[in-house]
Image (cartoon, helix red, strand yellow):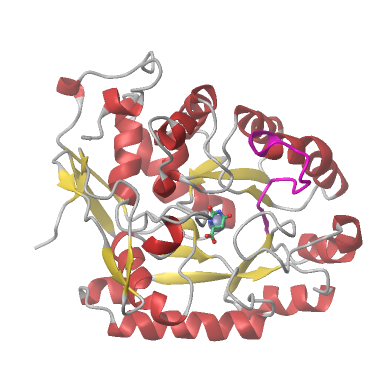
Amino acid sequence: MILNTASISDTETSPSNAQTNNSTPKQITLARPDDWHIHLRDGNSLNTTVAHAAQSFNRVICMPNLVPPVKTAIEAQAYRDRIMQALEHANIDDRYKLTFNPRMTLYLTDTTTAEDIKLAAQSGVVQAVKLYPAGATTNSADGVTNLASRHEVFSAMQKYELPLLIHGEVTDSHVDIFDREKQFIDTTLSSLVSQFPELKIVVEHITTGDAADFVLSQNERVAATITPQHLLFNRNHLLVGGVKPHFYCLPILKRKQHQQVLLDVATSGNPKFFLGTDSAPHATHAKENACGCAGCYSASIALPLYATAFDSVGKINRLEGFASQFGAKFYGLPLIDERITLVNEPMQVPSSYPYLGQETLTPLMAGETLPWSIKLES
Ligand code: DOR
Ligand code: ZN
């Protein structure tokens, strides 16, 4: 499959404002983007994931769902050190080694204290705290079981201006998997936002029009990240014609109508919506399995994927705000001077990457052709 506007909407209707090919610019140059939500994992995984992330991004917010999770500022610093060590050994241009800047997160548990939050805020490396409802997704078993018991911690985050990043899904087994994000907004997120009006919140990897509407209805302290897969695909891509495990992530891909709303808000120029790939590596055999893991690996091709999505609705000119400016603004970080150029020239996505010595890692769109690529610098 060649991924273009037609194939994005191949199972449904085309976006109404799709631009014709002859109005697509040949290339765009933008400030080097940041990824505000990425999973790099740990140990030997870092030999693959860090090089991919550093070639596309300046800052990345590293998710803390390791085994065991990253729970304190000291653990976050040690994890960052391991990432930087992997960067040193990466077979990539030195310029990426100089600029790549991993920002760390703490994993909120039932035992996180206000003191942990204070130390994290003072550490200089912890950018935010991640809330996984226990059982919601990969490595979330140590997540929060009772939000009401975490009030002191949320107050401390508010006080020390440490944002809360939320995996917004309920975990009750009786709730339909396609309704879990909306239920979380209705039953949990709305009241959290009213109880902590000064707390900065990012609703991570939103997947529904309901989540987009919720974020739009709040003040500038509430924002959202959007992944490339939720902009480009819907549940038909996952399920029609056979189950496609490499499209399986959590929150799960939703209906075409939700995909369209996400495309609308991502390309609207509204700074509440910014780039977060949720690139989440799992070895190929763990994805292509009777009980396949959730997560799409996109770090190496995320920028061509986002460019394809924005171009599909004639809004490539809005990519820089989404990818390189709005997240920095939300986190109060400086804009990046370094530039990167994306060209409207096809690239073939590798069928897999070497991973963990003997394993392979299959990226999203493995073996397929994308219409946009990253221009190689001379
Ligand atoms: O699909 C997902 N994979 N969603 C998450 O929230 C976690 C991630 C992972 O760590 O694999
Ligand atoms: Zn994630």
Q: Quadrant of the N terminus?
A: top left
Q: Is residue 151 left or right of residue 376?
A: right
Dominant secondary-structure state across the stretch colored magenta: loop
The single residue placed furthest to the front in the displayed view is 290
Q: Is residue 173 above or below residue 51?
A: above
Q: Residue at x 82, y 47 (%)?
A: 192
Q: Residue at x 73, y 64 (%)?
A: 143
- Ligand 2 placement by image quarter: bottom right
Residue 347 at what x, y percent from top left? Answer: 16, 46
- Quarter of the image holding residue 13? top left
Q: Is residue 175 above or below residue 65?
A: above
Total residue callouts? 0
Residue 148 at what x, y percent from top left? Answer: 90, 56
Is residue 6 within the magenta segment?
no
Q: Nearer the viewer, residue 287 or 160?
A: 287
Q: Quadrant of the C terminus?
A: bottom left
Q: Is residue 33 left or right of residue 72?
A: left
Q: Is residue 53 above or below residue 18?
A: below
Q: Nearer the viewer, residue 337 or 109?
A: 109
Q: Residue at x 52, y 22 (%)?
A: 257
Is residue 168 within the magenta segment?
yes
Q: Is residue 284 left or right of residue 21?
A: right
Can the viewer see residue 145? yes
Can the viewer see residue 219? no
Q: Which residues are magenta?
A: 163-179
Q: Residue at x 78, y 51 (%)?
A: 198
Residue 258 at what x, y percent from top left? Answer: 54, 27
Residue 354 at what x, y percent from top left? Answer: 27, 71
